Amino acid sequence: MSQLNVLNRYLFTDAHARGELVQLSSSFKSIIKNHNYPAGVEKLLGELLSATCLLTATLKFEGDITVQLQGDGPVGYMSVSGNNNQQMRGIAKMAEETSAETLQTLIGKGTMIITIRPSVGEAYQGVVALDKETLADCLAHYFEVSEQIPTKIWLFCDTEQQLSAGALVQLLPDGDGSIENKEQQLSDFEHLCQLTNTIKSEEVFSLEAEALLYRLYHQEKVNIFEPQAVTYVCGCSADKCLSAISQIEPSEIKAILAEQGKISMTCDYCITTYDFDELSLQSFISKVNH
């Protein structure tokens, strides 16, 4: 897979189901750059990135989504945020060094918190226990509990090549609501899941989306929509740092400057450091005289 950072959505026109495929390279590399995460942490963060892309693509409105993993394991906190434009950022915070590789050994006893913030309207949150073997299974359980929509997710991550990918198949309830209709829909859904289950990691990382979808679903009627680019956008800026500094008491700003000669702020996500000297903070310091 070249420098591909693309999400594809598609409809199975005869099966009342929808699908998504996301394949990521440079956007994943940007998230893990400068962090020196152990391989197991990188892998889980890559899976969480793909999962959040897939979840963001299920939103039918403008807004953003944050998926957080919290637990009592070596990785106390992991989070990926994205919006309807597929602008993503993510981070992991470790309580201790670890060579753990699995969800359970990395996070320990924990929860997944999914926060959805529409641009218009109220934010809402879903919380599920991280008690399944894989992140993909935990997400499927989230859909089952909170959305009551049959959904299956597949997640892939290659830490050596720094590639991440994921696929989703979701039932679209349709028809007259009869038992026969529901049974047919579930049968179609299971059939599509069995086909998707044949994805191999080397294929998802080497084939372009159309070639991979044709290999999986060449006997199905699939309507593929326009691909959407996935980008890494940290969101930090000097202005945001200054806004935070403006909340500090002027006397405290003066004391820090006297001791250190500057105020430095480092972004947790991209590790960019912003330095502010006395001249650039003059307007904040002058408040002390008013």
Image (tube, rainbow, N blue to C red):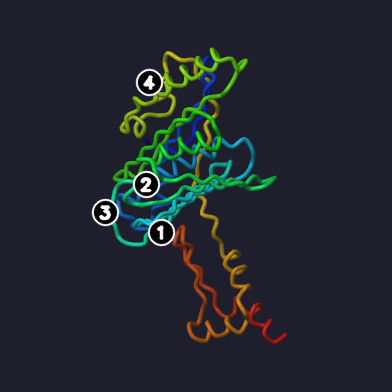
**Disc with the residue nearer the chain's start (1 vs 3):** 1
Q: Residue at x 61, y 16 (%)?
A: 175
* Residue under pointer 1: 93
Q: Nearer the viewer, mark 4 or mark 2?
A: 2
Residue 97: percent from the left, percent from the top?
30, 60
Helix, strand or loop under label 2: helix
**Disc with the residue nearer the chain's start (3 vs 4):** 3
Kindly identify the amino acid type of the residue bearing the numbered disc 2: Leu
Q: Residues within 10 Å of mark 3 (few under 14, many from 20)?
A: few
Q: CA distance from mark 3 to mark 2?
A: 12 Å
Residue 44's mark?
Answer: 2
Front residue of 136/204: it is 136
* Residue under pointer 3: 99
Helix, strand or loop under label 1: strand
Kindly identify the amino acid type of the residue bearing the numbered disc 4: Arg
**Disc with the residue nearer the chain's start (1 vs 4):** 1
Residue 66: percent from the left, percent from the top?
53, 48
Kindly identify the amino acid type of the residue bearing the numbered disc 1: Lys
* Residue under pointer 4: 215
Q: Residue at x 45, y 58 (%)?
A: 270
Q: CA distance from mark 3 to mark 4?
A: 36 Å
Q: Residue furthest right?
A: 290
Residue 162: percent from the left, percent from the top?
34, 45
Q: Residue furthest front?
A: 179
